[in-house]
Amino acid sequence: FIRFFSDPSKLSTIAYSLVIALITTIASLAIAYPVAYILARSKMRKKFVLLLLFVTPMWINFVLRVNAIRELLNWIGLLGETNYFNTIFGMVYDFLPFMILPIYTSLLKIDPTLYEASSDLGAGWHKTFTRLTLPLSMPGIMSGITMVFVPALTTFAISTFLGGGKVHLIGNIIEEEFTKAS
């Protein structure tokens, strides 16, 4: 531990990993919360189909998903230019369902009569959201943050495939230590 934490390159890798994981988590939350809110509050009969569209990519092998994103970024012309953007984009795409599902579940559990009571008591949309919806969905938000932040912090495949070998995260250090030991 002393050797690990006294190495400046490993400390900078930890710092980069924390920043990238934080950006990935915030971006995922910014996308997932409105999606989950719209799905949970909509009156559509077939809203499970929309939810299925977000969850279906989780059924595909992780490496295939990362390669698909790599090909898409290559086709657009972004592969190799902005390595950190590619890595964050790939992580957000890959971990987004892990943010949507817990938030969606917590929003579904909110009793609809609470919204009616809030309206009857004269609260507007903003006050209802900040005083009712957001606090009651906090367990789902915290679960989603945990389910995105930890994998984003320790991933190595996404940074290797999409970062072009220029993005080095904690997961890459762990991979290197395992491959050196064997």
Image (cartoon, rainbow, N blue to C red):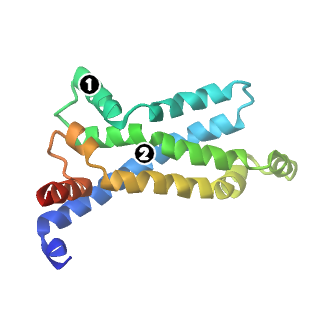
Image vertical order of residue 8 relative to residue 103, above or below: below
Label number found at residue 71: 1
Q: Quadrant of the N terminus?
A: bottom left
Looking at the image, which residue sits at the far bottom? 2
Looking at the image, which residue sits at the far top? 75
* x then y, percent, for residue 148: 44, 51
Residue of label 2: 27
Q: Residues within 10 Å of mark 1 (few under 14, many from 20)?
A: some
Residue located at (47% from left, 53% from top): 147
Q: Are marks 2 and 1 in contact (CB under 8 Å)?
A: no
* x then y, percent, for residue 76: 26, 22
Q: Nearer the viewer, mark 2 or mark 1?
A: 1
Q: Amino acid at mark 2?
A: Ala
Image vertical order of residue 39 relative to residue 169, above or below: above
Residue located at (16% from left, 33% from top): 80
> In this view of the protein, can residue 126 be seen by the observer?
no
Residue located at (31% from left, 59% from top): 18
Q: Amino acid at mark 1?
A: Glu
- Quarter of the image for residue 57 reads top left
Local secondary structure at mark 2: helix
Q: Quadrant of the C terminus?
A: bottom left
* x then y, percent, for residue 87: 28, 42
Q: Is residue 51 left or right of residue 62?
A: right
Image vertical order of residue 45 relative to residue 33, above or below: above
> In this view of the protein, can residue 166 be seen by the observer?
yes
Return the residue nearer the eye: 36 or 120.
36
